[in-house]
Image: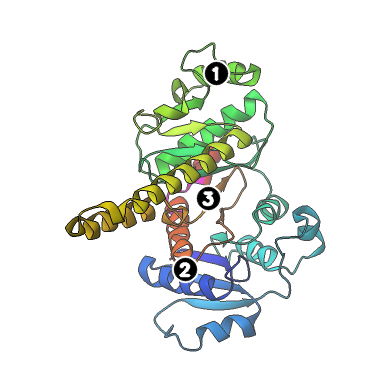
Amino acid sequence: MIRLAIDAMGGDYAPAEIVAGAIQGARELDVAVSLVGNPEVVRRQLQDVITSDLSLEVVLAQDVIHMDQDPAQAVRISPDASINVACRLVLEGRADGVLTMGHTGAGMIAALFNFGRIPGIDRPAVIVPFLGIRRDLYLIDVGANADVRPVHLLQFALMGSAYARYAGGIVHPRVGLLSNGSEANKGNKVGKEAYALLAGAVGLDFIGNVEPHTLASNDVNVVVSDGFAGNVLLKATEGMVANLLAQFEYLLPQMPPDSVELVKSHLEKLRARYHYASYGAATLLGVQHPMFIGHGRSKARAVRNGMATAVRMIAGDVIGNIQKWA
């Protein structure tokens, strides 16, 4: 049974929503859970919940890293913070991966500090499903590396391909490089040099440059980018989708009464599909143990789905498959 160390104190709605989501995930996904945090506070959330059918433990952490703290400094000076304790559970073999909805930077720094990089990987990168636009579409990097060199984009491509194959079940992932044109000579200096590296990479099904407006219809599975452009693309798309759905909802009073409930139902399904909670957590690739980081405003549904993301990645041994070629 896969065991996840969950940072019970991280996030805007911790510990209540974190604990609720962890219990839901443990029950639905058959996952063992270590809730890391203040035992008194965590157990208070469990007092009215039947957990006898679950493999569940509460692990003491005497501190927590808050959103307004400098992540690098906080991780180093707070060894007993919940995110650090969760990482140590993995290092001690007491858990298979860490899930946090707390400080994003602290999650990444804690993974680097405690786990270290996979030898041969210069920069860890964050990969996410690209909303719900397509079920087989992933975006890497979405925020870990604002400035990159061409070789970093090659490493992102190889890691993303491994993730899509072993966690996403895509037998032959097709990889594209995010650019402002589909032609090989488009893009900035880093992009053009990365294009040549990706085109010559053994074992990589590189299809060339891809433009943002083609992602819904293109047959690409992994879109590679630096963390700055990837993060902007993700957030811009999130905002645009939310705005469009809101505009449709605004039109509901103008529709025939017998159509309103049907349209409203479809809008809610679309909103759920495109919401970050549908995948729950991003995966940090390039470190030696699994680390999953969700939005700070995550509630129980996002925690549960973040656990599902973690299970797929761990069960697929994505890290082991990255280590084979790194």
Discs 1, 3 touching: Cβ within 8 Å: no
Q: Residue 294 carries which label?
A: none
Please name the predominant secondary structure of the magenta segment in the image: helix
Residue shown at the point (24%, 57%) measured from the top left: 260
Which quadrant of the rendered structure holds the N terminus? Answer: bottom left
Q: Which of pointers 1 and 2 lies earlier in the amino acid sequence?
A: 1
Which element type, helix, strand or loop, lies under badge 2?
A: helix
Q: Which amino acid does label 1 sit on?
A: Tyr
Nearest the camera: 223 or 160?
A: 223
Distance Cα–Cα, label 1 vs label 3: 25 Å
Q: Which of pointers 1 and 3 lies earlier in the amino acid sequence?
A: 1
Residue shown at the point (69%, 49%) measured from the top left: 112
Distance Cα–Cα, label 2 vs label 3: 16 Å
Q: What residue type is labelled 3?
A: Ala
- Residue ID for mark 1: 195
Q: Which of pointers 2 and 3 lies earlier in the amino acid sequence?
A: 3
How far across and down, in percent of the image, does residue 302 sit? 47, 61
Distance Cα–Cα, label 1 vs label 2: 40 Å
How far across and down, in percent of the image, does residue 147 sit? 69, 32
Tell me where residue 87 sits by quadrant: bottom right
Q: Does the magenta stretch include residue 122?
A: no
- Residue ID for mark 2: 300
- Residue ID for mark 3: 282
Nearest the camera: 284 or 30?
A: 284
The residue segment tinted magenta is 314-318
